[in-house]
Amino acid sequence: MRKIPLIFSFLLFVLLVNGQQDIKARQILEEVSKKTRSYKNLSAEFIFSMENKEMDIDEKNEGSLKMNGQKYVVDLPAIGIKVFSDGQTIWNYMKDGNQVTISNTGDQGSEFLDPSSIFNIYEKGFISKLTGEKKEGKKSYYQIELTPEKPGSDITKIIISIDKAEMMVSSANFHSTDGNLYGVKIKKLDTDIDLPDSFFVFNTNEYEDVEVIDFR
């Protein structure tokens, strides 16, 4: 399950980039980065998928992401996961068991839960390459492949689709060393919405009899 929030860390990282990449890929990603940085915040509805042909797994779940700077909430209601962060503290709530674990951002393992770290993932050893374009209906998309410079990553490669007209990330597929293929497809994206700071803080009063495990 820890790979799920990790996937969203990677997904957010694809928005702003500064990595080793071919010239065309760099130009595209820098334009996406510039546009993304111009927004006060982001709210996205998405479909999260996991496929493993050898194990006959093909799952799809809908979810949402809301982000304001380093603050975020990732919600996957179908599998009972909701992650909050106010930029300093991370609350990982699991509906199954009615349990929340609390940690500080920057603690060992917290990178699995921190979508804001997407903004510097390319500085940490990813190579990007424009592999082509594709059409779906009336829309056209750039296809960019990311691969880690060094071995040892849980992710062997990431395939990103970027809407050519909107210059925004449309989907991302993550090939994992465990044989799983994780996917995130954006259904709807809103920007510059009203998100109070309290929205990004887990409120125990809203979860009756919740078990709190504090690792701070």
Image (cartoon, helix red, strand yellow):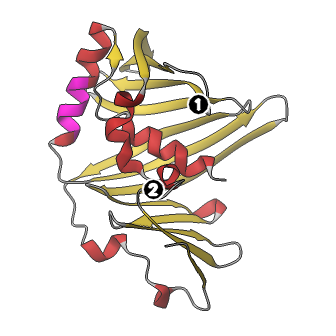
Left or right, 188 with reference to 181: left
Q: Label 2's element?
A: strand
List the residue tagged with mark 2: 64
Left or right, 65 with reference to 62: left
Residue type, numbered disc 1: Ser
Q: Residue at point 48% right, 46% down?
A: 8
* Mark 1 residue crowding within 10 angstroms, few (<14) / some (14–19) / many (20+): few
Part of the protein shown in magenta: 30-36
Left or right, 19 with reference to 97: left
List the residue tagged with mark 1: 153
Q: Nearer the viewer, mark 2 or mark 1?
A: 1
- In this rendering, does residue 166 appear at all? no
Q: Label 1's element?
A: loop
Image quarter for residue 201? Answer: bottom left
Circle number at residue 166: none
Q: Residue furthest left?
A: 38
* Front residue of this view, candidates 74 and 63: 74
Find the distance from the CA under tag 2 to the CA under tag 1. 26 Å
- Magenta span: helix, strand or loop, mainly? helix
Which percent across, then down, holds residue 78? 63, 61
